[in-house]
Image (cartoon, grey):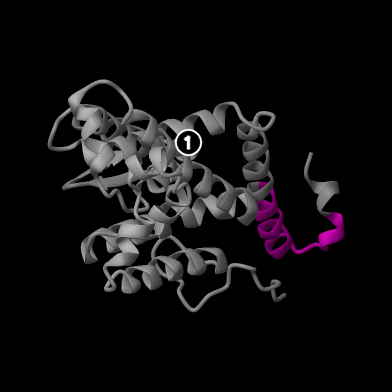
Amino acid sequence: MRRPASPYASSFSFGPGPISTALQALIGANVVMFVAQLYEPVTQVLGLHPALVIHSFWIWQLATYMFLHGGIFHIVFNMLALWMFGGELERTWGTRYFLKFYFVTGIGAGVLTVLFSLLPFGFARQLQDINIIGASGAIYGLLLAYAIYFPDRPILLIVFWVPARLCVTILGAIAVFASLSEAGGVANATHLGGLLVGYLYLKGAGGDPLSEMKYRYLKWKMNRLRKKFDVYSGGRADDWDRHVH
């Protein structure tokens, strides 16, 4: 019996899974903007400058900075992480919730970075005159969500395989300490913001979305089990409920 085609079908089918239409659109938009950055004013206008957001109300930068990157390794790492962690989360949540979470964490990380730059400390004030770019705020939010859903999945951290929950803990600790240093505060404040916004969003906003997502995940697992039973039981699909109690 031939199974119906998946909405996630793609010519890419290796690694963590196929690349959905939504992921293709996000990755494509990042690549297009990366090429557009060859024209230098693009980075200056669309990158996140906290001082311009505060004093000139260039609020679009809170969203546009997510699509800019500082070099080939920067964009490759972020897009690889988006595929690796975002692909499975999208299949668990559904495309609509996945996109909502991605933009909430990315924009929220930008907002927290701007607020952080208002603190009366030198390591915070330095952010006001910095051009912040990259999707890392949203990526860190996805990493946190992945650790909540798949806490024991191994993730390669430098040269060691560690459980996802431990990986997020280590990265979060690094972001906290690096944000308090003159050298590392530029990007890591945004990383930490992505972790914080992602955690608060999963735990509190919108009528306990975590419970809703757990329900969706269990439903997805049950559907997979049902398909497997239909193929190998030798009976009809209509008889499924009579065999499972």
Q: Secondary structure at mark 1?
A: helix
Q: Quadrant of residue 146?
A: top left
Identify which residue is drawn at 64% across, 69% down: 6
Q: Quadrant of residue 35?
A: bottom left
From the viewer's perspective, tell me whether residue 241 is left or right of residue 52: right
Q: Is residue 29 above or below residue 244?
A: below
Q: Main secondary structure of the magenta part?
A: helix
Q: Position of residue 111 (x, y in %)?
A: 44, 37
Q: Is residue 72 above or below residue 50?
A: below
> How crowded is the residue under tag 1: few (<14 C-alpha within 10 Å), some, or many (20+)?
many
From the viewer's perspective, tell me whether residue 240 is left or right of residue 37: right
Please indicate, yes or no, whether residue 19 appears anywhere in the rendered image.
no
Identify which residue is drawn at 37% across, 52% down: 135
Taking the view exactly as shown, the residue that stands out farthest to the bottom is 11
Q: Mark 1 is on which residue type?
A: Gly
Residue 39 in the magenta stretch? The answer is no
Q: Position of residue 226 (x, y in %)?
A: 71, 54
Pick the quarter of the image with the C terminus.
Answer: top right
Read off the magenta span: 222-239
Taking the view exactly as shown, the residue that stands out farthest to the left is 183
Q: Which residue is mark 1?
A: 198
Depth order, front residue of 21/153 = 21
Q: Quadrant of residue 201?
A: top right
Pick the quarter of the image with the N terminus.
Answer: bottom right
Depth order, front residue of 226/202 = 202
From the viewer's perspective, tell me whether residue 121 is left or right of residue 201: left
Identify which residue is drawn at 39% across, 48% down: 139
Identify which residue is drawn at 33% across, 68% down: 34
Please indicate, yes or no, whether residue 67 appears anywhere in the rendered image.
yes
